Image (cartoon, rainbow, N blue to C red):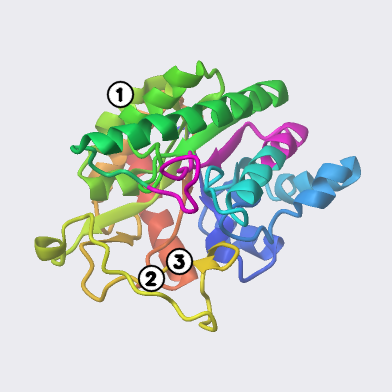
Amino acid sequence: MALKLGAYTACLHDRPLEEALDVLLQNDLTSVEVNTGGFIPSPHCHVDLLLASEQARRDYLDVFATRGMDLTGLNCNGNPLNPLPGVGPKHADDLRRSIELAGLLGVRTVVTMSGTPGSDPWARYPSWVVNPWDGVYLDVLDYQWGVATEFWREIDALARACDVRVAIEMHPHNLVFSPVTLEKLVQLTGATNLGAEMDPSHLMWQGMDAVACIRRLGPLVFHAAAKDAMLTPGVDVRGVLDTSFERVPAGAPDKVPTGYGYRCNAWPADPAWRFVAVGVGHDVGYWTEFLAALAEVDPDMPVNIEHEDATYSRLDGLALAAENLRAAAAKT
């Protein structure tokens, strides 16, 4: 099996890059994805320095090469279309800089999200349309797709000039949250360098079949995340579109920023669904099928663990996910 198994290092932001890489090696993971902007900081990639200095780029790549590891992706997940002045413009700039840096480093892929604009040219906040049965919401979507098309045409051109592919995570609260909406973005923009980051977790809790999604998109799948999800008993009365979240106090430790003045909220005590370590929500047999479908698209595709299971520590959750992912790869 030639798929490159690795991890996104955001779960190890509590330690320097070198120590984080050693943790991955202890789990037989050699593919690495680091954050370069957007929602969260980028302690494992000093973007300004690397953009400015060729020597710094050589030294940075040596950190991976001397360990026999590959830097396979830069991650800049955010909302570049957010109308809030402290969010959208910054995330858009972070994305452009990430693409430029990827080109300079020889990294093939930048992972990001499509973003969501406001409902109209005067909107102050982003607005995600879930079910446009009322005709007014088709008007909103027409406007939003117009904004997205203009922005992503520009990004596609930049990516093409830098010889970089942009892999969009199909994530709810974004315009692109499914294979159908990803295909729509590619069609509207005429893109050559836009495709999908296949993170199955968000497809799972929406009720999609991740393997079917891979086969639907085919060569539009550029990159993959190993991240599991499961429906929980709360779904019986909440449904997967539940909004019963609560604010996290500004002074709380480990709060996760999403933009200037904004942060991730706290989940309900009995959620409808949650993220779990690879193999907890779906067994090794399922992940074997997932990896086999990816290999049909690209046998050398990076598959990077994204650990967000709050029931495990950073190290224990990563180790469990790596064990199950390796077991699935061995059966492929």
For mark 3, give the secondary structure.
Answer: loop
Residue placed at 50% from the left, 15% from the top? 190
Residue at mark 1: 216
Total tally of numbered discs in the picture: 3
For mark 1, give the secondary structure.
Answer: helix
Residue placed at 38% from the left, 24% from the top? 184
Marks 3 and 1 in Cβ contact (< 8 Å): no
Residue 289 is at least partly visible in this image: no
Q: Give the distance between the C-alpha atoms of the residues marked 1 and 2, in whole angstroms.
A: 32 Å
Tell me: residue 286, above or below residue 220: below
The overriding secondary structure of the stretch rendered in magenta is loop
| Left or right: 184, with 252 as reference point | left
The N terminus - image quarter: top left
Q: Give the distance between the C-alpha atoms of the residues marked 3 and 1, in whole angstroms.
A: 32 Å
Residue at mark 3: 264
247 or 10, which lies in front? 247
Mark closer to the observer (2, 3): 3
Which labelled disc corresponds to residue 310? Answer: 2
For mark 2, give the secondary structure.
Answer: loop
The earlier-in-sequence mark between 2 and 3 is: 3
> Where residue 89 appears, x then y in whole percent?
64, 47
> Where residue 122 appears, x then y in whole percent?
50, 45
Disc 3 residue type? Cys
Which residue range is magenta in the image? 98-127
